[in-house]
Image (spheres, rainbow, N blue to C red):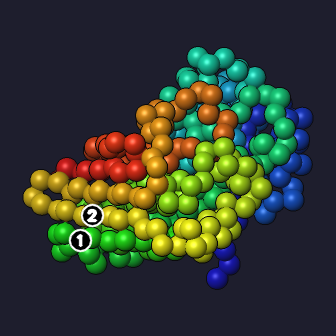
Amino acid sequence: MSVKKPSILLVDDESYNLMILEECFQEHDYDLTTAEDGQQAWALLQANPHDFDVVLLDWMMPQMDGLEVLKRIKAHTDLQHIYVIMQTARAGKGEVRQGMDAGAYYYLTKPYKEEDIQSIVETAVHDSQHRQAVQRIVEQNVSTFGLVKKGMFEYKTLAECQALSILLANTYPDSEKIATGLSELMINALEHGNLGIGYDEKTQLKKQGAWLSEINRRSALPEYSAKTVSVSYQKDAAAIRLTIEDEGAGFDWQNFLTLNPERAKDNHGRGILTALNSFDKLEYLGTGNKLIVQVQL
């Protein structure tokens, strides 16, 4: 069976800009579709709601501007999962905040370097593919673990982390909603907590395409290989509560409960926000190496 190429919708009212974007991604294995204004983009999205993984969207356009397209995407049940990268010359903090509040996953201010947009699109494509893969597995096993009431788990590696997050997501009534956010939190505990990969370091690893290999390399080193992330699961008639605790020193978690406009152009840093949309309650304890998430039943 052939693997579907990542599909990207490029939206800009300047044909020259569209040509530059197509050239920028010509060496990547993407299916590229172009739209010359917001109305054309919205028509394509409505007609093909499951076709696109990422939308690279200009803000200032005639007929329908990018912000209106973004708002419609996020209000549409079949489209709201799409990762939208807003690109614009509007660089003020208030405008960046407006775009992020409307649901933009990334925010690029013009002019930008080719390597920056390539890195951000690559990250958005990876995140989209990961979300789809997790949800496919969850859908296949959605009734398997419905009888689980209580459990204690540990993981050390990324493979163990991903397998456990899928198992646990299957115990929730709305497993698809939970899957991606839970996966993000559990990966954070491993990479930032136990393996000590900081925010700036991850930015560079993502740009270099070396994030996954570095995770696996560190997991095998003596100073990290014995560290575990523990997960406690408790289900009763009222709620499902999950506690995740790593062996790291913690982090400044308060800064990641909202999206700072200064991080809007970074190629990662949205995992906790994703989780906030998945759970009814998310609470970090102490220095941030322990958190509790809860879903009401």
> Which quadrant of the structure image shows residue 67?
top right
Residue at figure coordinates x 50%, y 28% from the top left: 101
Q: Is residue 157 left or right of residue 107?
A: left
For mark 1, does the 10 Å Cα neighbourhood hold few (<14), some (14 to 19), or many (20 or more) residues? few
Q: Position of residue 157 (x, y in %)?
A: 51, 72
Q: Is residue 168 left or right of residue 116?
A: left
Q: Is residue 56 left or right of residue 99?
A: right
Amino acid type, callout 2: Ser
Q: Earlier in the sequence, mark 1 or mark 2?
A: 1
Depicted 253 relative to depicted 193: above or below: above
Tag on residue 151?
A: 1
Q: Position of residue 277 (x, y in %)?
A: 39, 44
Residue furthest toward the left? 237
Q: Are marks 1 and 2 in contact (CB under 8 Å)?
A: yes
Tag on residue 232?
A: 2
Residue at figure coordinates x 83%, y 52% from the top left: 25
For mark 2, does the 10 Å Cα neighbourhood hold few (<14), some (14 to 19), or many (20 or more) residues? some
Looking at the image, can residue 103 be seen? Answer: yes
Amino acid type, callout 1: Gly
Q: What is the total number of numbered labels drawn onto the structure image?
A: 2
Q: Position of residue 217 (x, y in %)?
A: 65, 70
